[in-house]
Image: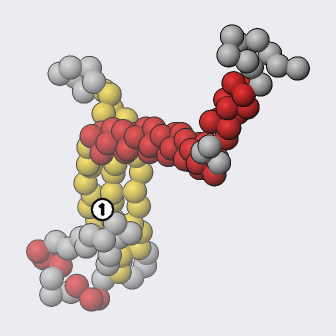
Amino acid sequence: MECSNGTISVGLSDVPNLWSTEIRRCSSRGFRIRRTSDEEIRNIQNFETVRADAQGIAEWVVGTNLDITERERADDALRSLAAVLSDMDRCKDEFLATLAHELRDPLAPVRSGLRFYGSQDRWGRQGV
């Protein structure tokens, strides 16, 4: 009775015989259409359910079409944002690794400078 998308298809005349009928197939498929009003391509998702009689012959088919264009655009935007955030996270990790390396010995540049200046006399000439 229930399709994979969680919907149940029941006609009003089927309510008394609801449990005596058998739903044979629930399916879904996607396709694209071109809207005539503005020539925009739209993504459509189709859901359908077939009810069969005891011999397996289809008695009726019920279905619906959903325009999922906006949802797919939102999914694409989320994937794009996730890629940007992943790249920013990698840059942050590189920065923190560099900063941690520099902070291990923060006086190294000062010592280097003092050694350099200590080896010169007061006129800037290298000592022997």
Amino acid found under the numbered disc labelled 1 = Val
Q: Residue at x 18, y 79 (%)?
A: 14
- Find numbered disc 1 in the image and state the secondary structure of the residue it sits on: strand
Number of numbered markers: 1
Look at the picture and state if 117 lies above or below 126: below
Residue at image x 27%, y 89%?
19
The structure residue drawn at horizontal position 42% and vertical position 51%, both measured from the top left corner, is: 29
Q: Residues within 10 Å of mark 1 (few under 14, many from 20)?
A: some
Pick the front one: 17 or 6 = 6
Q: Give the x, y percent position of residue 121.
A: 73, 18
Q: Where is residue 74 in the image (x, y as percent from the top left)?
A: 31, 42
Relative height, residue 47 to residue 95 (above, below): below
**Residue 67 appears in view:** yes
Asked whether 83 or 51 is in front, the reply is 83
Give the labeled residue for mark 1: 61
Q: Which of 119/34 is in front?
A: 119
Q: Quadrant of the N terminus?
A: bottom left
Residue at the spot 26% in from the left edge and 61% down from the top edge:
62
Relative placement, left or right, of 111 versus 86 is right
* Residue 90 seen in the current view: no
In the rendered image, residue 64, in percent from the top left (x then y), is placed at: 25, 54
How far across and down, in percent of the image, does residue 57 sit?
40, 70
Residue 36 vs residue 59, the one in the foreground: 36
- Residue placed farthest to the front in the image? 122
